[in-house]
Amino acid sequence: MAQGQVNKVSRPQIVSELGIPDRQAENLISMMTGFGMVIPRVTTLTPLGHAIVKSDPYFERIETLWSLHYIVSSNSDYVVWYRIINEILPLQDTLSVDQVSEQYFSDLKIHYSERTITEKLPTEVGTVLAAYSRSELAQLGLLKESGKGNFEKAKPVEVPDLTFLFCLLYYRDHYSPGSTAISNTDVCQAEHSPGKVFNLPEYQVRATVERLHYAGLVRLEKLANLDQIRLSEDLTQEFVLERLYGGTNAN
């Protein structure tokens, strides 16, 4: 899969070029879908997928990792991942696979078998937690491992302004389509929003938005009772990705 030449990711192609079993290739495509790199079912690369394949194929840039983290963590279809990042991590400084599995997913018992809950759920919880301490996502500084099956919150690295803007546009396009303005409160607190997924305090979100405002990328409108962020219809995810990966600096 040569850089800059990939439009579609097929399972046979992955099996052939990476030399991995068909089932493992299927899991890889599923993971790329969850991280927003390929479009479901047709497995065509998204604009983000194109940018990463072309400019950051080894996932070395913090902008890439924050973007992937946001996309998978904002999608409530990925129940375990979503709950850990949005509901559990903000409340706890320490986490264990057993405690998280037992305390936060009891409602799933009416939908899944006892075997799934007792065996597969802890495995999935452990996979999500380990992703932030052992994989490239560990560079985000969200978690550190403190013993087998035990994790502690760490001090995350700062979310770059352009990455925050990309995630804000992703939020607009997927969860508030057609919106030309988003309230500062929603950016900070609404389900799926960058502020909530990144677990950022309001003052930090406001500081980021103000920098984007002074850079001419968004317009911050301070109204009597409601501050809102005005987003131009011409401001797209593709535009921001070009700024991020195309060699143009915004900061």
Image: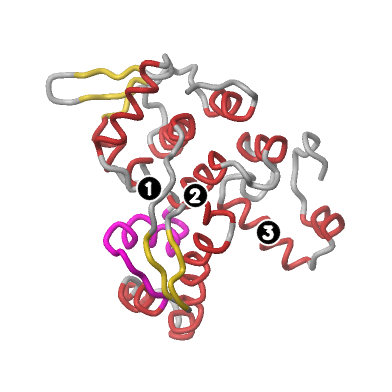
Q: Residue furthest right?
A: 16
Which numbered disc, 3 or 2, marks the residue that appears first in the sequence?
Answer: 3
Q: What element carries label 1?
A: helix
Circle 2 sits on which residue? Answer: 69
The 10 Å Cα crowd at callout 3, few under 14, some 14 to 19, many 20 or more, is: some
Q: Position of residue 200 (x, y in %)?
A: 32, 43
Q: Which percent across, then down, holds residue 89?
A: 34, 60
Kind of residue at badge 1: Val
Q: Is residue 85 left or right of residue 23?
A: left
Give the image location of residue 44, x and y in percent. 69, 42
Residue named by callout 3? 28
Question: In the picture shown, does residue 201 fall above or below 126?
Answer: above
What residue range appears in magenta? 76-97
Instruction: Give residue 135's quadrant in the image.
Output: bottom right
Disc sitting over residue 236 in the figure:
none
Q: Name the residue nearer the viewer: 86 or 251.
A: 251
Residue placed under numbered mark 1 in the picture: 197
Give the mark nearest the N terminus, 1 or 3. 3
Q: Is residue 178 left or right of residue 229?
A: right
Which element carries disc 3, helix, strand or loop? helix
